[in-house]
Amino acid sequence: MHYLMEHVERYLMACRELTAFCAHNGWIDNKTLDYEILEKNDHHVLAFVQFEEILMEGGGRIAGRIPHQGCLRLTLDRYGQVEHAELV
């Protein structure tokens, strides 16, 4: 289970699928990224994910933060590494 958590966390920090939750053209603050495994088997993991979207002003200043959450189904390869994700 420990290795699975490392694989999931590494994948979530870099995956593009999470940007689908961002509605204001901002970016994901990885420092606020948190997740919980809701279900798992040998082929899939269902993860509940939370993070803040950072919004910027024209001058490069942070204009705000918007919290987001949602579920992703992560498909695992035979080694337990995440191959891809889809919004649920």
Image: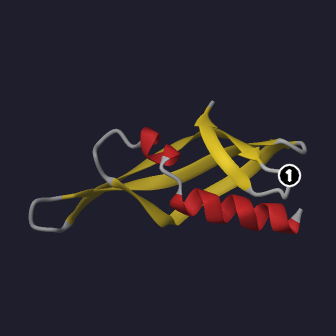
Q: Position of residue 87 (x, y in %)?
A: 58, 34
Q: Could you tell me which residue is drawn at 62 percent across and 42 percent down?
A: 85
Nearer to me, 74 or 49: 74
> Which image quarter: residue 54?
bottom left
Crowding at dot 1, Cα within 10 Å, few <14 / some 14-19 / many 20+, comes out as few
Residue farthest to the top? 88
Q: Which residue corresponds to mark 1?
A: 78
Nearer to me, 10 or 78: 78
Q: Position of residue 50 (x, y in %)?
A: 57, 50
Q: Quadrant of the C terminus?
A: top right
Instruction: Say what secondary structure mark 1 lies in.
Output: loop
Q: Could you tell me which residue is drawn at 39 percent across and 43 percent down?
A: 22
On screen, residue 22 versus residue 44, left or right, reads: left
Specify the amino acid type for callout 1. Answer: Arg
Q: Could you tell me which residue is drawn at 36 percent across and 56 percent down?
A: 27
Q: Could you tell me which residue is drawn at 59 percent across and 57 percent down?
A: 12
On screen, residue 60 versus residue 30, left or right, reads: left
Q: Position of residue 67 (x, y in %)?
A: 45, 49
On screen, residue 53 versus residue 38, left or right, reads: left
